[in-house]
Image (cartoon, rainbow, N blue to C red):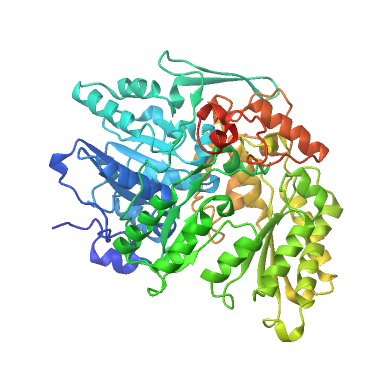
Amino acid sequence: MRKLALNDEILLKIEKPARYIGNEVNSVMKDKSKIDIRFAMCFPDVYEIGMSHLGIQILYDMFNRREDVWCERVYSPWTDLDQIMRNEQIPLFALESQDPIKEFDFLGITIQYEMCYTNILQVIDLSGIPLNACDRNDSDPIVIGGGPCTYNPEPLAEFFDLFYIGDGETVYDQLLDAYKENKKNGGSRKDYLRKAAEIEGIYVPQFYETEYKEDGTIASFKPTDSHAKPVIQKQMVSNLTDTYYPMAPVVPFIKVTQDRVVLEIQRGCIRGCRFCQAGMLYRPTRERDVETLKQYACAMLKNTGHEEISLSSLSSSDYSQLKELVTFLIEEFKDEGINICLPSLRIDAFSLDVMGKVQDIRKSSLTFAPEAGSQRMRDVINKGLTEEIILDGAGQAFEGGWNKVKLYFMLGLPTETEEDMKAIPRLADKIARRYYEIPKDRRNGKCQITTSTSFFIPKPFTPFQWAKMYDKEEYVARAAVVKHEFQGQLNRKSLKYHWHEADVTVLEGVFARGDRRLSKVILEAYRLGCLYDSWTETFDNEKWMQAFENTGVDIGFYNLRERDSDEIFPWDFIDIGVTKDFLYREWERAMKGEVTPNCRVRCSGCGVMKYKGGVCIESKN
């Protein structure tokens, strides 16, 4: 019988002990004596968030299909248990076996957002693994990172042995086989890292060095080991239909953020919004076969007992078989009370028709993401939406019975003026006005328009990677302009306004485009007590500012300047297919307010055609 790593006394002291006991439905148990590799898969946040992440569910299923591998899960302990583990010297453990992470061969960490960086150090530290990769020996697990933030891995370079760049379904088998072979031959840790560096898509930070110019920008970035590649190629699954997908995902005991079956219908996006990193990283758009998706849906709902299914993608409206798939799900599960969730839809007649069939209109709200209030600004970011389209979509939604709308915008975008800021409340008011144009007897109560603004963050591998950011005070001032304009709108009683924390945005921007010199800042912030920085109740900006001061790193260097056209970026050694030349052309088009058509209308020559998949193949036919 499995012995829990935490005794009853500790479990009674902490919040939500079910986060740590494992043994959930569909979790995988194996005989340790019959496997060669133990892999601890980590999401560096609380259980409820980590259990909602599809990528980990895919890799968990993929690894555990191998008889020689046992993949288990681990998440960041919440602050209450973190303190107990430190005081009582309890090592961090995996959910399935409850064994210490230190006993595993690999610790794989998915890195989804910049504000989890101190949690990554927490996980490594509580596992009893040296924080710096250069201090580890042959008895320590190999620490490997994956996920969107690894497209600029440099701020975390000192803490990871390997980074996996791209879709996880491609070269992990090679990586694990190389580890097995190295172990069998009595090879050292360094021997394995050299073998790993020869595998496409694998980046070993300790085999590279950076030289800097006097102004602090990068002079050169090059390998120091003959096994390391000068350029790391993004790994991509060309055929999503024939790759891995979990038919029996793990079902949590407690309510989690996404408590439902998740059906990934496609990867990538055809739209080309200039601020959107995911839209560039995951090109080209690749669809899963609709018949396969029908089979997946039936199997997953049966194997989990979930009562809701979410169709996942960056832009679900662009999935060519969406109508057929949704119609099937409605018919197949009409007597079983299954809810169908459709995030990431463009608000057009088809989408509204579909949503009207699957949602309780009186309870649900619609989400629009115009991103910018003025047409000029929407053209700069290449959003592809006119005010006419937005108001027409809202009107159709109101006619269909909806009365609650959420609007998402960004402040601080390149070239933004005060008029662009004021256009946000004005657009929200026009949408509310559109509602009150409907005869009173056909309205569904009062209208509620909730507007949220986040602050723009320039991300690597986007046309806006050259853009400057602002300091905290400037962001707050811009939000104040918007708030003041809201107060003057005709329908202000129907309008609500929220904005994102400015100090968090500044840090996110610094780490999004940072280099290796930021590793010491992250380490110092962790030593000062920073943890769960993406959570409002635990974020401490003063400690972060102290970390920058203590390490002598100038935060302004990373966010308060526009980049030169020929500047070497910390991530330039990674090839995602989309070329830097294309991104700069898009930057120049943005400055002129020129719109670039989506990938299905016209190929814009971004470079990903070389991957020979998805929409790029369509465009050749």
Q: Position of residue 251 (x, y in %)?
A: 33, 61
Q: Is residue 367 left or right of residue 75?
A: right
Q: Is residue 36 left or right of residue 568?
A: left
Q: How many marks?
A: 0
Res 152 visible: no
Q: What residue is at 38 percent from the left and 67 percent from the top?
A: 15
Location of the N terminus (image quadrant): bottom left
In the image, 156 versus 260, the foreground residue is 260
Res 144 visible: yes
Q: What residue is at 49 percent from the left and 61 percent from the top?
A: 326
In the image, 594 versus 57, the foreground residue is 594
Location of the C terminus (image quadrant): top right
Q: Position of residue 403 (x, y in %)?
A: 67, 75
Q: Position of residue 323 (x, y in %)?
A: 53, 59
Give the quarter of the image for residue 461: top right
Give the quarter of the image for residue 451: bottom right
